[in-house]
Amino acid sequence: MDDSVARRLRPFGTTIFTEMSALAQRTGALNLGQGFPDEDGPAELVEAAAAAMRAGRNQYAPLAGVPELRRAVAAHQRRRYGLEVDPDAGVQVTFGATEAIAAALLGLLEPGEAVVALEPTYDSYGAAVAMAGGILRPVTLHAPEFALDLERLEAAAAGARILLLNTPHNPTGRVLTQAELEGVARICREHDLIAITDEVYEQLVYDDAVHVPLATLPGMAERTLTISSAGKAFSFTGWKIGWCSGPPRLVAAARAAKQFMTFAGGTPLQHAVAHGLDHAERLTTPLAAQLQANRDALADGLTSAGFALSRRSAGTYFLNADAAPLGVTDAAAWCRELPHRAGVVAIPASAFHASPDSAPTLVRFAFCKSPQTIAAAVERLQRLRGAG
Ligand code: PMP
Ligand code: GLN
């Protein structure tokens, strides 16, 4: 029987982000689809990267990552969250969070074991679980509140090996509350799950939302591998510098797989990100404030264009709008027409579900774009209503 990775990946096809960004390029539409900023991050990080290149830091990094970045990750976790990680055995630098997720699953999962994840699910999760030969057990967050149903989580956790938790959550913009996290932690402890947490939007939370790493809850530090990335925190998504941190046995498992995927790279960028993490609070606070203002402008604009928004996104780059009031019944088809009809690209929420019939009228819009881009997109979407 053909059980190649390619066969297992066939159902995942080409990612919706690739498809929709290509459509934006072809049509010249405003791209509120794939989550990347249209303005670069802090100039001082570009300078730090250039300085590292000029200083000759252009050869392979050590497998674990350059010591400066591992120290900066450990210092960030201690300063911000009170988490103690060993900068040598407890931190692994990766090619973005994507590689950290794949390496962790490949390193930790036995074929046939189950991984629980919140659905809608970030696109690489299902594919990475499939590569590792595992089985994804989604626990759905339902619109409009996207609340976590702990009873369902508990049912899914029975007999599973890993919980792959994303908060702040892409695509819903939910930031799990302390009470939800306590429930998640209890379930992990009672079912002896390893937690892999995807916290790439940890710096990007709005209003009174607070990001709490699962690893800070009682009994969780020893069973949690925490993943993050510089792409979102510093608006350099193309640098692809990510990392995982936690107990040495979990980091070692991810490292074992990562070693033979990419070994080590991006040396000068790792040095720049070390500088960024050392100054994370100063550098990311203005970005979060700008994103919050963008979110408000987009939410207000979409509401006036006739979309239904039940709740504002509390974090991430994204908000979800219901296009049903515009007469939309199939958001996936509608999003594929939208660039042609209105010159705007957005992502159908169904793309983040195992069943394509889920969330049929929800659309994810990215607000990590310039205020001018958001205003222009809103204006185009408002015209749709008149056009019927
Ligand atoms: N996890 C989530 C929830 C994301 O939205 C993304 C996309 N940026 C990633 C992981 C991947 O991060 P990276 O670009 O660092 O690989
Ligand atoms: N994280 C980005 C998003 O959710 C996409 C990254 C990618 O294209 N893999 O839009």
Image (tube, helix red, strand yellow):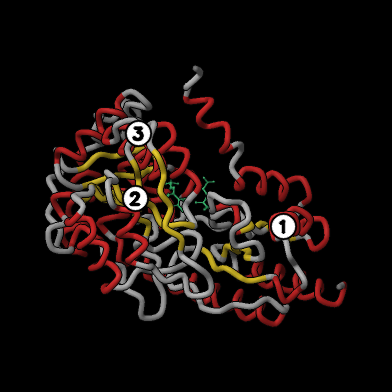
- Closer to the chain start, of discs 2 and 1, is 2
Q: Residue at x 20, y 40 (%)?
A: 250
Q: Residue at x 43, y 68 (%)?
A: 174
Question: Residue 278's image quarter?
Answer: bottom left
What amino acid is found at the position of numbered circle 2 in the picture?
Leu
Q: Residue 112 carries which label?
A: 3
Q: Nearer the viewer, residue 230 or 120?
A: 120
Q: Mark 2 points at which residue?
A: 164
State if disc 3 and disc 2 touch (CB < 8 Å): no
Q: Nearer the viewer, mark 1 or mark 3?
A: 3
Q: x, y percentage for residue 184?
A: 27, 62
What amino acid is found at the position of numbered circle 1 in the picture?
Cys
Viewed as shown, does residue 12 lie left or right of 68?
A: right
Residue 67 position (above or below residue 183): above
Residue 6 position (above or below residue 83): above
Q: Residue at x 21, y 52 (%)?
A: 191
Kind of element beneath mark 2: strand
